[in-house]
Image (cartoon, helix red, strand yellow):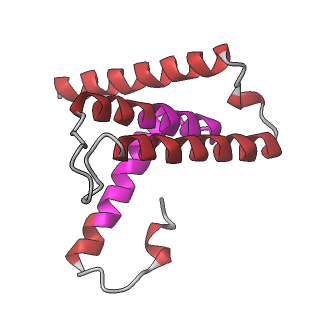
Amino acid sequence: MGNESCADDMWEHMFSMQMALGKRLGVIPETFTDSERIAWVLNYARALQQEVAELVDSVPWKWWAKYQKFDLQNARVEVVDLLHFLMAIAQTLGMSAEDVYVTYLKKNAVNHARQDSGYEFKNAEDSRHI
């Protein structure tokens, strides 16, 4: 139980740090209109796409190129960059660290249920309760 509390504290701390960084950059989600919220979700989603591309570039993905090297350290940094933007999206949508955690638990249960049933067909309704 002690480890969960420590992990909760870490997530809360990271969300707090992300909010402070956003505010330093003039991004204050609690003041957004719907159109601003949409614009920032799109901004962050595009940034996520770029960070995924940078993560891909950290691993030798060009099967035809011999010069590539696996950059483990950079790959790890790119994962953290992804977390920055994921937290920013969550905050833009009004989610706290706890909201993300609770939603994750519910969605994880749905994913396990899908695997238990063989996940032979898509059922958009199985996530509606989340």
Q: Is residue 18 magenta?
A: no
Which residue: 44% across, 37% down?
82
Which residue: 38% across, 49% down?
104
Identify the magenta region.
82-111
Q: Is residue 83 magenta?
A: yes
- In the figure, 122 relative to 19: above or below? below
Quarter of image, res 12: top left
- In the figure, 76 relative to 40: above or below? above
- In the figure, 77 relative to 106: above or below? above
**Residue 124 in the image, given as x and y percentages of width and height:** 49, 76
Foreground pick, 29 / 21: 21
Which residue: 49% across, 75% down?
125
Quarter of image, res 11: top left
Please give the count of numbered marks on the rendered protein.
0
Which residue: 70% across, 25% down?
27
**Residue 103 in the image, given as x and y percentages of width and height:** 43, 49
In the shown orientation, is residue 124 left or right of residue 89? left
> Which quarter of the rendered picture does the N terminus lie within?
top left
Foreground pick, 40 / 111: 40
**Residue 84 in the image, given as x and y percentages of width and height:** 48, 31
Foreground pick, 103 / 76: 76
Quarter of image, res 55: top left
Please identify the dominant SS of the magenta region.
helix
**Residue 54 in the image, given as x and y percentages of width and height:** 42, 40
- In the figure, 125 relative to 109: above or below? below
